[in-house]
């Protein structure tokens, strides 16, 4: 935890007010006494008494404690506190927010209160998206030796990151809750499907899928022993290959920790997706890559429990690739089979990777 002391606070307040600030006391609300607070408690509000010239003022500095009510991550807490700062002053009669700030690792305090939008600046990575490989295979219908090598490398990458575990069962429950209810996940996707698009994607069908996914939340949300390091958005557009199997991954999403079936399902369903566009089923070159991906991952992990939790993750990714907003040119037959896949997978208690073509068929 950072150190909260008079000197750092005086420098921060002086930069904020553009005048020299002198602090007379720092104390927890409800407690008296001025002191430097080393490793002060997150979530504890502090009263700061200070003067600017001869004018005496007071302010309250408050952070937010990590908790399992949607504030597990630093970004969750930043979101909440930034919202507080932006909204308090727009409500009549509300206590005013002076600023929003942050602590740096070396104990400095910085202001972010004037920020309107945030950004991230990353290094530039050379390479070509893995989806170009899949598009080439879609066009020619055959594999090159490098294709199997890259599929193996990607499965091995997931094996390596999924070995890193953490004991935080409530965070696992949160990740499953987000899978169902987050705006980027199942309910958000369903709400953004165009109404009346075609006879395949009816409101009744989307309703059934959502209900099926909620049912799966109750089946798997307490399997916190499975929580591990994840990428969170491991699809062919987020992988850049250079020569051979030299690659970089991009755009990790939705937190450091999650369910390994998320990453596995996200990549596996793309082999199905491209195969559907060429063959109308899983076969040929894409079936070989799909099988190799599973063989490599399962051979290294032996994680057969994954087959009992992957269903809602496959449903989510099926809703992504079946969405006409992103893939408007898919044939009605491909879209129909994707929705068959979603509903059939949600019906089975144990997913079978070798039964994909059955899942692509009509309702049982």
Image (cartoon, grey):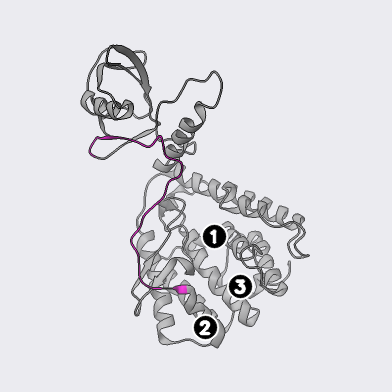
Give how far apart the Cα atoms at labels 3 and 1 are.
14 Å
Helix, strand, or loop for circle 1?
loop
Q: Nearer the viewer, mark 2 or mark 3?
A: 2
Q: Quadrant of the C terminus?
A: bottom right
Give, as a single range, the part of the protein colored magenta: 106-130
Query: Which residue is located at x 43 percent, y 46 percent?
Result: 118
Point out residue 181 in the picture as x, y percentages from the top left corner.
59, 47
Position of residue 104 relative to residue 159, above or below, is above
Majority secondary structure in the magenta region: loop
Indicate which disc residue 59 carries: none
Helix, strand, or loop for circle 2?
helix
Label located before the other in sequence (1 or 2): 2
Query: Which residue is located at x 35 percent, y 80 percent?
Result: 244
Left or right for 13, reference 221: left
Number of other residues with Cα within 10 Å of mark 2, as a class: few under 14, some 14 to 19, many 20 or more = some
Number of other residues with Cα within 10 Å of mark 3, as a class: few under 14, some 14 to 19, many 20 or more = some
Q: Is residue 355 magenta?
A: no
Q: Quadrant of the N terminus?
A: top left
Cβ atoms at labels 3 and 1 below 8 Å apart: no
Residue placed under numbered mark 1 in the picture:
310
Q: Is residue 114 magenta?
A: yes
Label located before the other in sequence (3 or 1): 1
Give how far apart the Cα atoms at labels 2 and 3 are.
20 Å
Indicate which disc residue 137 carries: 2
Indicate which disc residue 356 carries: 3
């Amino acid at each position: 935890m950072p150190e909260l002391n008079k000197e750092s606070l005086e420098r921060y307040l002086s930069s904020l007010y553009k005048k020299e600030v002198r602090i007379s006391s720092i104390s927890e609300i409800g407690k008296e006494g001025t002191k430097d607070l080393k490793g002060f408690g997150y979530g504890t509000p502090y009263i700061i008494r200070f003067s600017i010239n001869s004018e005496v003022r007071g302010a309250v500095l408050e952070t937010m404690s990590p908790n399992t009510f949607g504030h597990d991550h630093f970004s969750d807490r930043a979101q909440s506190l930034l919202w507080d700062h932006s909204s308090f002053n727009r409500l009549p009669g509300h206590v005013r927010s002076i600023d929003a700030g942050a602590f740096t690792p070396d104990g400095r305090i910085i202001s972010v209160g004037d920020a309107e939008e945030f950004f991230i600046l990353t290094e530039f990575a050379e390479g070509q998206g893995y989806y170009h490989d899949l598009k080439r295979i879609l066009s020619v219908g055959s594999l090159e030796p490098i294709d199997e090598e890259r599929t193996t490398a990607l499965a091995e990458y997931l094996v390596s990151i999924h070995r890193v575990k953490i004991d935080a069962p409530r965070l696992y429950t949160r990740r499953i809750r987000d899978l169902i209810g987050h705006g980027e996940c199942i309910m958000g996707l369903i709400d953004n499907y165009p109404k009346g698009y075609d006879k395949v994607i009816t409101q009744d069908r989307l309703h059934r899928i959502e209900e099926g996914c909620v049912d799966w939340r109750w089946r798997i949300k307490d399997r916190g022993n499975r929580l591990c390091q994840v990428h969170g958005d491991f699809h062919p557009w987020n992988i850049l290959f250079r020569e051979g199997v030299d690659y970089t991954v991009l755009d990790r999403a939705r937190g450091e920790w999650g369910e390994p079936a998320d990453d596995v399902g996200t990549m596996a369903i793309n082999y199905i997706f491209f195969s559907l566009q060429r063959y109308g089923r899983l076969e040929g070159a894409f079936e070989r890559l799909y099988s190799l991906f599973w063989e490599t991952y399962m051979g290294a992990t032996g994680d057969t429990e994954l087959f009992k939790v992957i269903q809602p993750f496959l449903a989510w990714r099926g809703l992504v690739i079946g969405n006409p907003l992103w893939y408007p040119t898919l044939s009605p037959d491909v879209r129909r089979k994707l929705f068959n896949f979603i509903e059939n997978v949600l019906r089975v208690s144990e997913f079978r990777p070798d039964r994909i073509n059955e899942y692509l068929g009509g309702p049982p």
